[in-house]
Amino acid sequence: MRRVSGFTLIEVVVVVGIMAIVSSLMLANFPRFNKQIAVDREAGKLALALRKAQSYALAVRDFNNPLFADDPFCLTPPVRFPGYGLFIDLAEKSHYFIYGDIDCSTDHVSGLAEEEIVETVNFEGRVLISDIIGFSPGLCGGGCSDLTEASVLYVRPGPAIFIRSGGADYNYVEIIVSSSDGSVTKKVVARFTGQVSIE
């Protein structure tokens, strides 16, 4: 008698059952996976925006206003070749700004200097900034988590880097990027040494 090779009904049912279990586990974790990808992408964009502001400052980008002074030492503001930075405001959690410090104040004051804005960067995929934490040994070594805004400014030739919030200077700042429900977070760290990292 000749044997016919093939799958038995029990083997097919077991394989289909295993595939159903694996598929259901993947579908159950898909929303978190999707949020993680969105937060990772937006944290990367934020770090790149910091690098973009730094490159604008080092490249001596023209602010393109012929009425501004051509003053490399910031003695007669507004200036055409300012330092450039990134400004984040928790009142506007869904976007942040790249700005030129045309008034040479080493800070961007929310609502007062709209003409300084070079580019507005919007978060996508239900991602927002949930917190800003500043670190300074003189103010709060363990971190000041009550910051409502922060600016990171790069001024040539070094560049000199100013990390400020509410008139106070910080050694570094942590910007917490999260999903809208807060279940997934990522930290972008900007230091006064020029280092930008994502943790």
Image (spheres, rainbow, N blue to C red):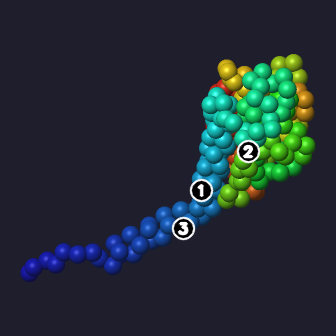
> Residue type at mark 3?
Ser
Name the quadrant containing residue 132: top right
Residue 61 makes an appearance in the image = yes
Q: Residue at label 2?
A: 118
Query: Relative to 198, does residue 93 appear above or below in the rendering?
Result: below
Give x and y (percent) for residue 97.
76, 45
> Residue type at mark 1?
Phe
Residue at left offset 80%, top offset 35%: 68
Q: Is residue 39 left or right of residue 174?
A: left
In this rendering, the label closer to the viewer, 3 or 2? 2
Q: Residue at label 3?
A: 24
In this rendering, the label closer to the viewer, 2 or 1? 2
Name the quadrant containing residue 64: top right
Q: Is mark 1 on a helix, strand or loop?
A: helix
| Disc number for residue 33 | 1
Label 1, label 3: how many angstroms apart (C-alpha)? 14 Å
Residue at left offset 39%, top offset 75%: 13
Q: Quadrant of the N terminus?
A: bottom left
Query: Relative to 139, does residue 150 appear above or below in the rendering?
Result: below
| Disc number for residue 104 | none
Give x and y (percent) for residue 78.
83, 33
Give x and y (percent) for residue 199.
64, 37
Q: Earlier in the sequence, mark 1 or mark 3?
A: 3
Q: What element carries label 2?
A: strand
